Image (cartoon, rainbow, N blue to C red):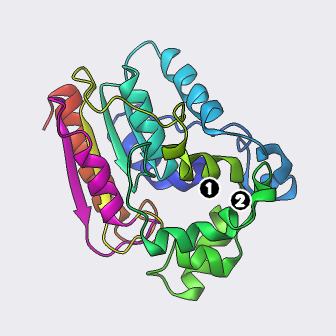
Amino acid sequence: MTPRSWEGWVERYRAQGYRVIAPAWPGIDGEVEDIRRNPSRTAGVGLREVIARYEEVIRDLGEAPVIMGHSFGGAVTQVLLDRGLGRAGVAIDSAPVKGVLPLPYSTLKSAFPVLGHPTRRNKAVPLTPRQFHYGFTNTLSEEESAAVYERYHVPGSARVLFQGAFANFNPRAATKVDFRNERRAPLLFIADEADHIVPPTLNRANRRLYRKSPAVTEYREFPGPSHFIVGQDGWQEVADYALAWAAHHAYGRG
């Protein structure tokens, strides 16, 4: 997905007086429809390039922001906090960083359309509406899922998924973090009960790896939503909780 998937959050937070930016990953800056016509722009983009893009954006801000990320954006959020960036972070349905071991069946099934074809690892790979429905929007009807697919789905970089999936076999993985980092800013994991791509077991396992750090690390699980927690009915509750938590820990508000 592109930053369009954050459209509701951006508007909601700006209405409360916050400066909100939602920069795109390398290769997917632009409109969804344009990217679909020319998906090759995302081919070969890896996690190091994604992380570098956000580190550059944050360092240019002049002040430490709250960082929020969804799915692989949650893993990127963890890496950025570990590097001393941001005053608080919220990782929503976070893809696992290096060291997280569980591999639930639904995660493997969701990833198979990409990981099942190693020759495509440096290509931009689309999901079919059926694959998207299983992975992203499994709690929605087929008609509702089709509408989400039409508005938000773009072919994604297969390289990112391969790097994430095999991080535990790579000593220099892009998603490697220091779980004992005591200077890390507060981090909140948000999970949802029905997520097929990142079930709560993954987020709970990820959080446990931080248990020896004195830095604030908290977890909240919402019942019901799919992986599309940032946009399906009820997203406002999730957005408000994330902002209230972040404002409290980053600015001492609330």
Q: Amino acid at mark 2?
A: Val
Q: Residue at x 23, y 28 (%)?
A: 250
The quarter holding residue 131 reads: bottom right
One can see residue 150 in this view: yes
Can residue 190 be seen at all in this image of the molecule? no
Disc 1 crowd, CA 10 A, few/some/many (<14, 14-19, 20+): some
Secondary element at image label 2: loop
Rendered residue at 15%/32% (across/down): 253
The spot of residue 171 in percent (x, y) is 51, 33
Tell me which amino acid carries mark 1.
Answer: Met
- Side of 204 relative to 117 (left or right): left
Image position of 26 with respect to 237: above or below: above
Depth check: 14 or 26 in front? 26
Q: Secondary structure at mark 1?
A: loop
- Please give the residue where the numbered disc 2 appears in the rendered image: 154
Task: Inspect the magenta stretch and tell me whether residue 212 lies in it.
Answer: yes
Which residue lies under the disc numbered 1? 1
In-image side of 112 versus 237 (left or right): right
Could you tell me if the residues under marks 2 and 1 are in contact, i.e. CB atoms within 8 Å? yes
State the image coordinates of residue 245 (x, y, percent, origin top left): 21, 43
Where are the magenta residues, as a range?
A: 199-228
